[in-house]
Image: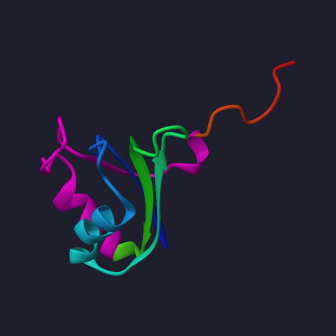
Amino acid sequence: MKKLFVSNLSPDATEASVSALFSEFGKVRSIKIITDIFSGRCKGFGFIEMEGHEARAAQAALDGKTVPGAEMALRVRFEDPKAKKGRGRRR
């Protein structure tokens, strides 16, 4: 299972619309679009989990692709769990 980080989503993006975009390449196991607390609109990014070979195909096809309603081209990257910030206190 691979987790993808997707950025530059349209403010009107929903879990259903993003899932439909990625489901062309395989089964979307989970999806989480980050939304604004007050307006409920997409903040422009989210996370998608897919099987490894399906995630690689989706990343290759959708990275740099412009979708309707988005101002910029999508950025699709694999989430890097090692790059998380704040992994402890500084001493």
Residue 25 image offset from top left, x and y in percent: 24, 75
Quadrant hosting residue 11: top left
On the rendered structure, is 66 left or right of 27? left
Residue found at the far top of this picture: 91
Q: Where does residue 40 sit, x and y in percent of width and height? A: 46, 46
User: What segment is highlighted magenta in the picture?
Assistant: 54-83
Q: Where is residue 38 in the image (x, y as percent from the top left)?
A: 53, 37
The quadrant the C terminus occupies is top right
Q: Which residue is drawn at 33% across and 75% down?
A: 53
Within the image, what quadrant is residue 57 found in?
Answer: bottom left
Left or right for 25, reference 48: left
Give the vertical position of 86 relative to 29 (above or below).
above
Q: Is 79 in the magenta?
A: yes
Residue drawn at (73%, 36%) of the image: 87
**Residue drawn 27% across and 75% down?**
23
Whether 39 is drawn above or below 1: the answer is: above
Q: In this view, does 53 lie above or below 58?
A: below
